[in-house]
Image: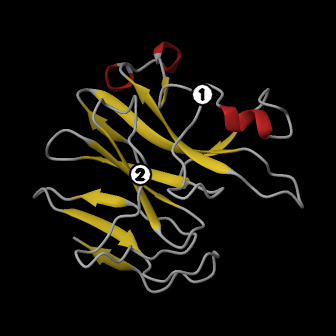
């Protein structure tokens, strides 16, 4: 995984990377994608920081030998997906391929809402992140909790979220689904 600016803020100043994944891989145009959370500051008494990135392989679906797998870290540049309001947390991304070929990422924030971002170039560049909204303009409430978006076989998309705007990790029941 390629270092980003956020890695320079970790206790090892980027010589070691802190990251994790809770989502699932997707395949688009014979490329495998997986979302990851990169962490910066982790020191007690200092605000934790995170952003979302993706790794992509054009070789993984066809190879059996792990030594031959090539990975790209996306997006290009040195900054991952962030909170729409610049908050310090953007974590646990999932991604789906939309019917028109765009990639849509969904990820948790500590802002009290689900965040989305879209890519029109297979994940290299991403548009400005935003809070998805109901038709009446209200944002989808979500505590600091996993909020995957899922594509069903019939082309319907489901957003998993908790519909409460707490900014902690405690209020995660019940779960809501919006199509």
Residue drawn at x 38%, y 73% as measured from the top left: 139
Residue sitting at the far right: 45
Q: Which residue is mark 1?
A: 1
Q: Is residue 114 above or below residue 6?
A: below
Residue drawn at x 47%, y 17% as measured from the top left: 70
From the top left corner, tell me how far across and down residue 65 is, in percent: 46, 17
> Along the line of sight, which residue is nearer the eye, 113 or 64?
113
Residue 17 appears in the rendering: no
Q: Is residue 129 above or below residue 131?
A: above
Q: Which residue is mark 2?
A: 94
Number of the label disc, if any, that sits on residue 116 = none
Instruction: Tell whether label 2 touches label 1 (CB within 8 Å).
Output: no
The quadrant in which the N terminus is found is top right
Q: Residues within 10 Å of mark 1 (few under 14, many from 20)?
A: some
> Along the line of sight, which residue is nearer the eye, 121 or 136?
136
Q: Secondary structure at mark 2?
A: strand
Decide if residue 17 is on the left or right side of residue 148: right
The quadrant in which the C terminus is found is bottom left
Quadrant of residue 64 within the rendered picture: top left
Q: Secondary structure at mark 1?
A: loop
Q: Residues within 10 Å of mark 2 (few under 14, many from 20)?
A: many
How many dots with numbers?
2
From the top left corner, tell me how far across and down residue 85 is, in percent: 54, 59
Q: CA distance from mark 1 to mark 2?
A: 17 Å
Residue drawn at x 48%, y 74% as measured from the top left: 142
């Amino acid at each position: 995984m390629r270092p980003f600016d956020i890695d320079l803020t970790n206790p090892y100043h980027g010589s070691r990377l802190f990251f994790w994944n809770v989502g699932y891989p997707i395949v688009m145009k014979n490329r495998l994608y997986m979302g990851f959370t990169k962490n910066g500051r982790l020191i007690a008494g200092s605000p934790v920081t995170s952003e979302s990135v993706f790794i992509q392989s054009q070789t993984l679906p066809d190879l059996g030998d792990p030594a031959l797998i090539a990975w790209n870290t996306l997006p290009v540049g040195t900054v991952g997906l962030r909170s729409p309001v610049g908050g310090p947390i953007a974590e646990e991304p999932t991604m789906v391929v939309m019917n028109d070929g765009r990639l849509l990422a969904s990820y948790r924030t500590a802002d009290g809402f689900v965040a989305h971002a879209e890519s029109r170039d297979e994940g290299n560049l991403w548009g400005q992140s935003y809070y998805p909204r109901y038709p009446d303009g209200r944002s989808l409430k979500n505590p600091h909790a996993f909020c995957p978006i899922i594509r069903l076989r019939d082309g319907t998309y489901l957003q998993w979220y908790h519909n409460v705007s707490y900014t902690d990790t405690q209020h995660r029941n019940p779960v809501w689904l919006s199509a």
